[in-house]
Image: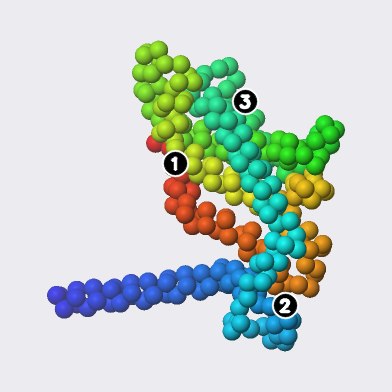
Amino acid sequence: MNLDFKRVERNAAVRKRVFTGLDYCFLVLWAILVLFPFYWMVLSSLKSYSAYNSEYIPQFFTLNPTLSNYVDAFTAVPLARYFLNTIIYTVVTTGLMMVVIIPAAFAFARLEFKGKQLAFTIFLSLMMIPNELVIITNFVTITNLHLRNTFTGLILPSVTSVFYIYLLKENFEQIPDELYKAARVDGTTDFEYLTRVMIPISKPTLVTIVILKVIECWNSYVWPRLITDNPNYFLVSNGIQEIRENGFGRENIPAMMAAVVVISVPLIILFLVFHKKIMAGVSRGGLKG
């Protein structure tokens, strides 16, 4: 019996090691597939124009890397201006959105008023509206207000988010009601309770929302491209098209790749630094109890 038990235990351990090895092999293969496009982008940006065009068969390495393409990325087109525009757009949009969604989430989570559930249900139903319809409506509104080619026109449609309000509301509701009742007994106003209790407790979720919004703003393409045709207001995402058409030309792939690398690096660093907070914040905001 003991020999049979040890044999079964040994076989189970072998199977576990085999499946673990297969899992790691799959993860390594998947990582290569995911990271290869970025590797190819960086590799292409380090090749000279002549070397890149002379390759009849693509080479997966280069013996003569050059940084001249990165110099061209900032000299052939106003990439620095695109970065500045994107930073202004991202910071202002994210800040205004937080000012809007925090009181809204607090109202739905803690305040009691007539028609609250109905209002929140209708509010959530807005997520069912296709983005294309919203873009058309926003475009007509911004155009009628003569706000095209302005930062105001870029920012206004993005200062709120139904999803982020819902995420923050779920997080606020996890805070015990006893804290709110005790604070009210002590004479604390709703605003003081929000700023002194709820916001500090919900800091991980708030940080997550800020990071996700920054990534969303940095990658924004359709709306900025639609509402601006003046290069002075281009963001880095729209600037790529400008780089392709009026900067390096359609054939200078290495220079274009250098510009794309420069644009991508800030977001990659942001995600690598805060990816644990993003995952923790989303999980915390989506669980109750």
Q: CA distance from mark 1 to mark 2?
A: 46 Å
Which residue is painted at 47% across and 54% down in the image?
273
First in sequence, mark 1 or 3: give its number.
3
Report which quarter residue 204 is drawn in.
Answer: top left
Residue 52 placement (x, y as % from top left): 70, 80
- The local crowd at label 3, few if under 14, some if 14 to 19, many if 20 or more residues have their Cα within 10 Å, is few
Secondary structure type for disc 2: helix
The residue that mark 2 highlights is 49
Q: Residue furthest left?
A: 2
Which three-letter amino acid code belongs to the residue tagged 1? Pro
Q: Is residue 137 visible?
A: no
Q: Is residue 226 left or right of residue 69?
A: right
Given residues 85 and 17, the one toward you in this image is 85
Quarter that holds the N terminus: bottom left
Q: Which mark is residue 204?
A: 1
Given residues 104 and 154, the one toward you in this image is 154
Which three-letter amino acid code belongs to the residue tagged 2? Tyr
Secondary structure type for disc 1: helix
The residue that mark 3 highlights is 119
